[in-house]
Amino acid sequence: MPPSPRPEAHPAGNPRRRTRTPAIWIFLALDCASFGLFFQVFMVERLDQAALFDASARQLDARLGFANACILITSSWLVAWATRTGMAGRVAEARRLLWTALAVGALFGVVKIWEYAEKISEGITVAANDFFVFYFALTGLHLLHYLAGMVLLAILATGPARAGDAAENLARYKVWLTGGGLYWHMVDLLWIFIFSLLYLVGA
Amino acid sequence: MNPYRYLKALAWSGPVLLVGTILCWGVLGQNIPPYSTALEAEALAALVREQALSIRIGMVLQMPLSVFYFVWGVVISKVMQTLERDNDVLSTLQLWGAGFTTLVLVIPCAAWLTVAYRPDIMEPRMLQMFHDFGWFFFDVAYSLTTMQFLAIGICFLSDEREEPLVAGWVCWFVMFVGVSFALLSLMPLVYDGPFSRAGLLNYWVEFTLFFLMMLVFSIALFKAINKLEAERHAAQSSA
């Protein structure tokens, strides 16, 4: 479909903003609230089927869950370091840290795939029982968040845009670095709750 | 030349659809709340027979009403195009997403209309099958709408005005609602509980979010059109 005739994107006299509050906060707050609701629903369902949920939790390998918690905490720490460095204007150093965070974070995916393959080979799927519906739902949703976060980190690791005004690009990069960092910390935080609720409670 | 002629009038298609869908699909169509997935075929058939006329009227009204979603999508695209600089890929994705979502609002209604048309002579399992088909189409084809919502969010976030056409929090809220639909993938895997099609998460939370998004974004769309018109008048006055 050819673009239709349109007015100028930024009419003359309309001031352009160089920085803005990362409105990603609303996304993060809603996401955390959603997971909070999922955790509450999980606990309510757990009350009705405590024995089944305990027995099912024992079928999970808490060592893998713990390893993934350590991986995400380390990766999150690297991102926090990169954000601080980037905000100070040392972009090259921030980019190196982001690539390192990305490499560490990739291990989470490897462990998760290993864990899923193990469960499926044991005949444990989403249809196994109500506990595993929650297990696959919560870890699957978290995995989607993780994948989006990895893509975001990779984009940030390539640095600010090169074309155009360098100062404006750096200002915009800092905003996205803050937002991306916050998102990655949320992925980390959510995993800690998921690990505690699924792998530890009842096991 | 007025590039915004008709936009505000057509933007009312969103609120009209929102109210109409709640009444036609929801109240008359017996979808607030929907019949439980855990019902046996005979029990479902008995409920449909009891409410057949109401369901038929609801679906007959909902099917033509659904075109308003596409009209709303066209208006959103026109506003998005005022922000696009290098190409129109986001407004195009949004428009196609709105178009396909319109079909999602039409085709399942045809399935539910079929179910309510001759429930007295329809074999209960056949009735259950058509009823399930309607719900799978309605819920699991969510990626069409997710694509639309992400395109909206990304495009309006790129607005570099001091006071953007659409507030940042609205953009992120719209994208959040789009992404939250991923939970609907679990619907065909369970028969009861919070992830079932009548469950707490996949019905009450997801549908509330969708309707809330339509309400919030409808208000944002009116404000955006007003801003564009004000900018145009200001530019004309200064010229």
Image: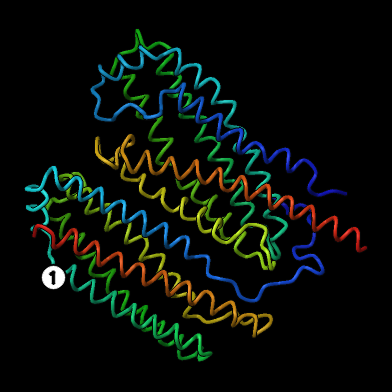
Place residue A200 in its image quadrant: bottom left
Callout 1: few (<14), some (14-19), or many (20+) C-alpha neighbours within 10 Å?
few
Query: Who's the residue at 49% across and 86% down the image?
Result: A86
What's under tag 1, amino acid-wise?
Arg
Task: Locate residue A72, reporting x and y percent.
Answer: 29, 74
Locate residue B111 relative to residue B47 in the image: left or right.
right
Left or right? Give the position of B64 relative to A111: right
Taking the image as shown, residue B49 lies to the left or right of residue A60, namely: right
Determine the secondary structure under disc 1: helix
The single residue placed furthest to the top in the displayed view is B121
Query: Relative to B208, is A146 above or below?
Result: below
- Residue under numbered circle 1: A63
Q: Position of residue B63 (x, y in %)?
A: 55, 26
In the rendering, at what x and y percent does residue A156 appear?
Answer: 48, 77
Give the image quarter of residue B66: top right
What residue is at 35 percent from the left and 48 percent from the top? B183
Q: In the rendered view, tell whether residue A1 sits above or below residue A200.
A: above
Instruction: Tell how many labels.
Output: 1
Of residues A90 and B238, which is closer to you in this image?
B238
Residue B222 shown left or right of residue A39 in the figure: right
Q: Residue A147: percent from the left, percent from the top?
A: 37, 65
> On what subunit does the disc labeled 1 rest?
A
| Quadrant for the C terminus of chain B in the image | bottom right
